[in-house]
Amino acid sequence: MEEKLLESWEEDDFNTGDELFEHHKFIVDKGQDIVRIDKFLMDKLANTSRNKIQIAARNGNILVNKKEVKPNYKVKPSDEISVVFPYPVREIELIPQEIPLHIVFEDEHLIVINKSSNMVVHPGYGNYKGTLVNALVYHFENLPMRTDDYYGRPGLVHRLDKHTTGIMVVAKTEHALTHLAKQFYDRTTDRRYHALVWGNIEEDSGTITGNIGRSLKNRKMMTVFPNGDFGKHAVTHFTVLKRFGLVTLIECKLETGRTHQIRAHMKFLGHPLFNDLEYGGDQILKGMTSSKYKQFIDNCFQLIPGQALHAKTLGFNHPESGERLFFDSELPQGYKDILLKWTNYTNNNIEAI
């Protein structure tokens, strides 16, 4: 599918959360005959079908005068029609590239992958090739069979940062895309991450609530606005899995899905992610000043290219069968090696406990 760049955007501009993005808008002419909305939109939207429009309507993605309507709604003169989705418009040429993928599950509706580190999810400014989407386009084009409902490009409903590893689901059909996007929008998915953070978190569990938005000083970073004067509502629940004294392994459960949410929230809490290049975690924040300790930390940093954050599990309802699916993934080897190093360090250094 040939697509043209609509506007420049960056990897971090893609976000799933409590927001609907308007893809199309129409004001019905005053002389318009009364007609079903699926037929009306089929005549207005290029390269679409009545079936796709009906799927969108059934998933609550077609609004008339700001209210959801069904496919049989009769369009009236002066109606304001919007086609909205919980993911932004992104029209950019997608170049297929043969890049290895770790596929966890795949059927004709969706694909679940275990994303590796150092891989941008989707093309954008400065990253037009070598992304997960480029790899998926190649994979989809070389499948032996595709359904009639094939979306034409990987249907992204969420994403992981470049250096964040773990489980992702991507839609392959129009129905799966709208259905999965709605689940993320309605917060009915179950996402859990493992994060290694600096410092000893004394509480066994807790919740971080604070608006997240672009930093007023550096737009490439997100920051927490605790008073709610900027940004969007964000909630992260965490549970301590293991304490190493100077660092802590935690599990994070996302209630919302803001850009860099875990990374920004943990920095705000005073516990940046270990080796987080953007949020200060790639510096020695706890521990001694000895050259031996510095070398130990540097050896840990060398094992992963960025923040120690892994999307461990993902649960959602299958868009066709309705079956609840749950996927779990192992930590990358480098991440596991870091935990082993910290285990050995704390066992042999009483000051680290």
Image: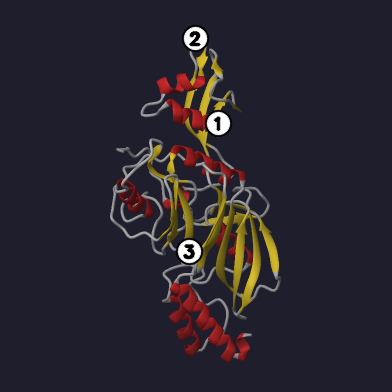
Decide: marks 2, 3 in contact (CB < 8 A)? no
Q: Quadrant of the C terminus?
A: bottom right
Q: Residues within 10 Å of mark 2 (few under 14, many from 20)?
A: few
Q: Residue at x 62, y 81 (%)?
A: 245
- Tell me which numbered mark, 1 or 3, is placed earlier along the sequence: 1
The reply, left or right, for residue 98 in relation to residue 287 is: left
The reply, left or right, for residue 225 in relation to residue 157 is: right
For the residue marked with disc 2, what is the amino acid?
Asp
Work out how far the residue at label 1 is from the one at label 3, CA to CA, in angstroms: 41 Å
According to the picture, the residue beneath numbered tag 3 turns out to be 278
Decide: marks 2, 1 in contact (CB < 8 A)? no
Q: In the figure, 71 relative to 93: above or below?
A: above
Q: Nearer the viewer, residue 115 or 79?
A: 115
Q: In the figure, 266 relative to 293: above or below?
A: above
For the residue marked with disc 3, what is the amino acid?
Glu
Q: Where residue 111 sits in the image (x, y, percent)?
A: 43, 51
Q: Residue 197, located in which quarter of the rendered image? A: bottom right
Q: In the figure, 68 relative to 254: above or below?
A: above
Work out how far the residue at label 2 is from the one at label 3, CA to CA, in angstroms: 56 Å
Q: Residues within 10 Å of mark 1 (few under 14, many from 20)?
A: some
Q: Nearer the viewer, residue 229 or 55?
A: 55
Q: Residues within 10 Å of mark 3 (few under 14, many from 20)?
A: some
Element under label 1?
Answer: helix
According to the picture, the residue beneath numbered tag 2 turns out to be 33
Q: Residue at x 51, y 55 (%)?
A: 217
- Tell me which numbered mark, 2 or 3, is placed earlier along the sequence: 2
Which mark is on residue 58? Answer: 1
- Tell me which numbered mark, 2 or 1, is placed earlier along the sequence: 2
Q: Quadrant of the N terminus?
A: top left
The reply, left or right, for residue 44 in relation to residue 28 is: left
